[in-house]
Amino acid sequence: MTSLFHPPFAGFRRRCALQCFHQQTNSLLLVLVLCCFGKPTVASAQTWTSNGPEGGYIQALAIDPTTPATVYAGTPGGGVFKSTDGGASWAAVNSGLTNTNVFALAIAPTTPTTVYAGTIRGGVFKSTDGGASWVDTQLTNTVVQALTIDPASPTTIYVGTYGRGVFKSTDGGPWKAVSTSVMDARVVGLATAPTTPTTVYAATAGGGALFKSPDGGVSWTPVTPVITRIAVQALAIDPATTPTTVYAATAGGGALFKSPDGGVSWTNVTPVITRIAVQALAIDPATTPTTVYAGTSSGDVFKSTDGGASWSPPVSTGVTQIASLAVDPVTPTVIYAGTLGGGVFKSTDGGGSWIAINIGLIHARVVGLAIDPASPTTVYAATPGGGMFKSTDRGRSWDPVKTLTEPNVRALATNPAIPSTVYAGTAHGVFQSTDEAGNWSSSALPSNTDVRALAIAPTTPTATVYAGTLGGDVFKSTDGGASWSPPVSTGVTQITSLAVDPVTPTVIYAGTYAGGVFMSINEGVTWNVVNSGLASTNVRALAIDPVTPTSLYAGTFGGVFKSSNGGITWSEVNSGGLTNTDILALAIAPTTPTATVYAGTSGGGVFKSTDGGASWAAVGGLADTLKTVFSLAIDPATGTVYAGTYGGGVFVLECTFARQLIVMDTSCCQMPGPASGSFEQNICVASPETRLFLDRICTFPSDSNNPCGQAGPNGCAVCWSVPYTNYCHVHDDPNNPTVCAYEFE
């Protein structure tokens, strides 16, 4: 007898139902199968699901002018989301939207079911049914960053593109270029004058900054003598004033300028918010004097009730940046803010307070993942701009970690020796929690340290922590983050990943942007380049085989490379579709004898290799659902794979299996404890309390009276899901094969 299972694996679970087609007397079937981790012994039907985190990057907002409870949100990578209840809930409306990188939205004022979406390199899409379906208007291969509609002629649309200037259509397409050589072709904002709608303003990324056309785009002139050569980031026109009052927010110094005469003269109206970039503007159409809102790069919203003459103290949304603002035209105390990372926020008191309204809006950009080593149902997710999230049910639901006030989180790590300790690498150093992300304290790193990678060597009770930075430095703490040694520079611009040898923790590897892989053999004191055979030096991910730590994998912008000698030499391992593919994440299943490696790609979803990188195959259709994967993590107990994606939150892969016939060679299984001994003429099959290890499943949830429950089909006995306290011993008898069909549900 050899023991396969031990109490540390008591948390293994699967939802399974098996049926026996052939029963052997004097034997007890032990099904041989490998689920997520191992060899392809069964036909699997693995599917990805995402339940959050909610929120994400919102580049554009648009409110239905006649039914203001209907709001649209444009996202990069997630397409268009729609709410019909004032943001209380959201749903994606992307049928026919073949490009989901939406940076601009516009609604026809007289037919508000007609909506336009401007995309990055996909041109403009049009919906005539409130987003239920979309058609391409054939402005192909164009980066669209701005849209505006003539209020007097709603079929006339202007499109601001980055690199091709302004286009115009009088019937929703075809399009005509209406730029001139006078203006900068990098158009980032457009606005039409409500009182003279043939007057169009175009904000550009440089050159003359702001241009004006008095004749519907036939001619253009610069109108910015004060702000010439400063890029304009946002435009707003007061709908109630004649002549036209224009507001222009600029990148230079964060200034906000106002012209009361259609661009003839300008005044700087931003003494309070100087040096904070203004990225979004909105005007309350019902107030006199004009109420103006300004959203900034710091996540704050400023308000002026006198047309910019003075500003109230800013109110923070708690996220990093405001990208868009929209005012309810019927109830102007209601304002929506689209943020870069935190989703949509709403104020119902004229900007006095803000709350996140993201139910159903799953668009988080997840760049880091970590699993609680003691309680693997708990998963942490890092987002740049939206902060940190936590799930306690394997990704089925997520809650924001509000106690971590730094919103720009880039990296996460948990301490295997003290699982309640979590580290977060942020744009302002490392933060530490000792109570499972309940409370946080800032580490002793300089507050301006932009941390992009974390790794832990659990060699001491407090753990040695390494932090890689945007500047190419590696910091080290030997007391769990309480203090840090002076940084050691690798001489490159950015550390993208760190990995510690689990057997020899004095050995650390660093993946870098454009510098390849660096290696330290003395706990980070000195670093050496180890790039022999590494054809691509833009390394975004590293992974060490926990069983054979001299086997090291590097995810690069040229695919996956493998070293079998601890980084001394590298070889390309991209057979199966990864050649010249940008690899952004890597993870290795922790218990397989031949490494099962997962690779997250830019544009291709997740790939899997079950033979140590020798061959690869796409996993579960994530490329069809959401293509770019920034981070990966694997539950060591169940094999559940988590993928942090660009704009889709965390996708979860739990194994499911189709019905399959297989020949078994196991004939004896014994259980110690109250139900010990062999069970003759009974086949004990898997139930929801399944134990998985390598390529064998053994399930004995039982009580002392009836270990296998009631008889199932074909005379087999089906185990009930009763709390499990025993483990089994296995004896293989190749002379007594058993044919069995099984099915995972």
Image (cartoon, rainbow, N blue to C red):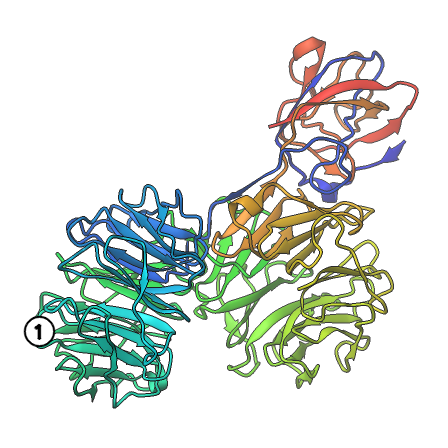
- Where residue 446 sits: x, y (%)? 55, 83
Image quarter of residue 229: bottom left
Residue closest to the far top: 715
Q: Residues within 10 Å of mark 1 (few under 14, many from 20)?
A: some
Q: Residue at x 78, y 68 (%)?
A: 534
- Where residue 325 sits: x, y (%)? 27, 65
- Residue 388's place in the image compared with 263, above or below, is above
Q: Is residue 244 left or right of residue 710?
A: left
Q: Give the quarter of the figure containing the N terminus.
A: top right
Q: Is residue 275 visible?
A: no
What secondary structure is found at the residue carrying circle 1? loop
- Residue 652's place in the image compared with 147, above or below, is above
Q: Nearer the viewer, residue 442 or 512?
A: 512
- Residue 2's place in the image compared with 601, above or below, is above
- Give the residue number, with chain letter if any, for mark 1: 241
Q: Is residue 46 left or right of residue 205?
A: right
- Number of marks in the rendered image: 1
Q: Is residue 208 visible?
A: yes
Q: Residue at x 63, y 80 (%)?
A: 493
Q: Residue at x 69, y 55 (%)?
A: 587
Q: Nearer the viewer, residue 374 or 240?
A: 240
- Where residue 615 sits: x, y (%)? 77, 47
Q: Is residue 49 left or right of residue 546?
A: left
The amino acid pointed to by label 1 is Thr
Image quarter of residue 531: bottom right
